Image: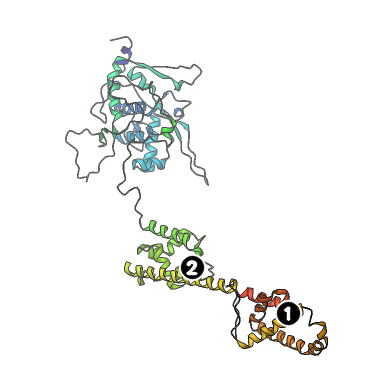
Amino acid sequence: MSAVAAPVAAVIPAQRPSIDDDAASVLPATLYVPEASQWLSTSTGRIAPEGYSWMQAVHWVAGSGLYAPRRHRSHGPRSFGPTTVRVAQELAQLSPCRPGIGYLVRRTGLSERSVEYHLGMLREAGLLAYIVRGTRVSGESAQASEFARMIPVEFDVALGIRTTLRDETAPAYTRAMTGIAEAGRELMAKLAKKAARKVRKPRSKTSSKAPAKGAPKGADQGYVTAVADEPRCTPMQVGTSGLSTAGTTSLPPESKLASGVSKSPTPKKSKTGGRRKLNTVGRRFQLARELTQELDWLRGCSVPRIAWVARNVADAGWTVTDVRAWLHFRGEAAHVRRGSGLLAVLLAGAENILNTPAKRADAIEQWRGALEAARRQRIQQVRARTERYEGGWQAPVSRAVQRDVEAAFTQVRETANGGRLQDQNHAADSQDAPAEAAVEQLCQEAEQRLASGDTSLIIVTVDAMGREAAERVYGERLVRRALQLESCSRSSLVTIGRP
């Protein structure tokens, strides 16, 4: 036996039961880290270079049986078993190691209290050390603790691992592995096999798949199964060689650990095509979100409130198209003060009336037909209004209106020419009184028609001879009023009554 291996063999006690068949053969005297030494600055261990080497130390602690939680506490788990190893496997995949309690609960299926117990056990065994301790401040979001994965000094002593501090100014926990004794190589190879395997969640007692008779079991009936195609936590494929890679394996680049968890190069395909099937509450919220997007009078309404209002039709399998078709037949208000209240009134009993897909499909067809008819009617109205106001002038059909128009044209032409010729001054003077009487009668008739909303007499004159000529006949006030009424008649917001 060499001089290096002699002190190692001196600390080998009798073999203890472990979670696997092949237990650790080289063990130190005791293993416990008090609470004051569970920080990185006060820890006596060294930082594990990566998760794979750290899992070797975890399996060594689990197999040695030197750390027993009930020695130091009166509650919690009784042993460092497969469940603790499962929690450690999740921590080994994180970079940085900053797990939340909720994250570990989802990944392991344990309760919050159980996760806290096993994290405390890993700290007491010297496998974890606080970098930053989490905080829980009232009114603020909880901050998760950040840990450093540590390799206890007892592990190095038991396996004869030689370490050195490459930078004398650096802390002691940054020392790196430089070699291993011959007596510890065989045990390191066994720990490498265990680190390459994955501890699964124990099967329930009522499971139909019973384990084989020769299958290895742990102290808590945890099954250790090998995963052939699953990538390890480190980029280097470490097998069952006799040398440990704890001091030589390089860290993976940050681009590979953007999410904190290493991913498989061949992701599993989802059986549902990548989309999760919605449950009852999900369908309600989906319908509510679509309604608030497509109905103007529901914009800004609370989606949870709309989901509660439309819960009956959503549970009956209605889509947003079915709801819009139903609202078309119920009628929609122009001014809505509270959208959710109006929707609750309109949807009352809808699922009982249109209770089959055929009825809903028929309602959708009728709604779409009504929309198409309304669209065509709007097109015809716009076309007729355009032809009326932008087309050529047409003479009035009524004989009385035609006589009035001819008299107006004559009067306008005479006014524009400055009256009759000078040689007819006497005749013109004799006709001034009748012409003025005709113009006055024409203005009175135009004013009476304006009072009832009829602007045709003045508008025809404006279209034919211009606004200035019409103002000389009817006066500026009547022409302005007629143009205003005509402009208002083109708006859909104003309705002018006619006798």
Quarter of the picture containing the N terminus is top left
User: For residue 413, which numbered disc appears in the image?
Assistant: 1
Q: Residue furthest left?
A: 213
- Residue 347 visible: no
Quarter of the picture containing the C terminus is bottom right
Name the secondary structure under disc 2.
helix
Q: Residue at x 29, y 47 (%)?
A: 271
State whether residue 189 is above or below residue 352: above
Instruction: Please state the horizontal and vertical placement of residue 196, each as a whole percent of the image.
Output: 30, 29
Q: To which residue does mark 2 refer?
A: 341
Near-viewer residue (297 or 169): 297
Instruction: Please state the horizontal and vertical placement of residue 121, each as a whole percent of the image.
Output: 37, 33
Q: Residue furthest front?
A: 423
Q: What residue type is labelled 1?
A: Arg
Near-viewer residue (398 or 78): 398
> In which quarter of the view is residue 212 placed?
top left
User: For residue 218, which numbered disc appears in the image?
Assistant: none
In screen coordinates, is 415 left or right of 162?
right
Q: Which amino acid does label 2 sit on?
A: Gly
State whether residue 125 is above or below residue 478: above
State whether residue 46 is above or below residue 215: above
Find out whether the residues at labels 1 and 2 contact each other: C-beta distance under 8 Å: no
Name the secondary structure under disc 1.
helix
Real-space CA distance between mark 1 and mark 2, rounded to the nearest whole angstrom:
66 Å
Instruction: Please state the horizontal and vertical placement of residue 118, each as a whole percent of the image.
Output: 37, 36
Q: Which residue is drawn at 47% across and 61% down?
A: 294
- Residue 323 visible: yes
State whether residue 377 is above or below residue 277: below
Near-viewer residue (460 or 214): 460
Q: How many labels does the image show?
A: 2
In screen coordinates, is 446 left or right of 334?
right
Q: How is the image coloured?
A: rainbow
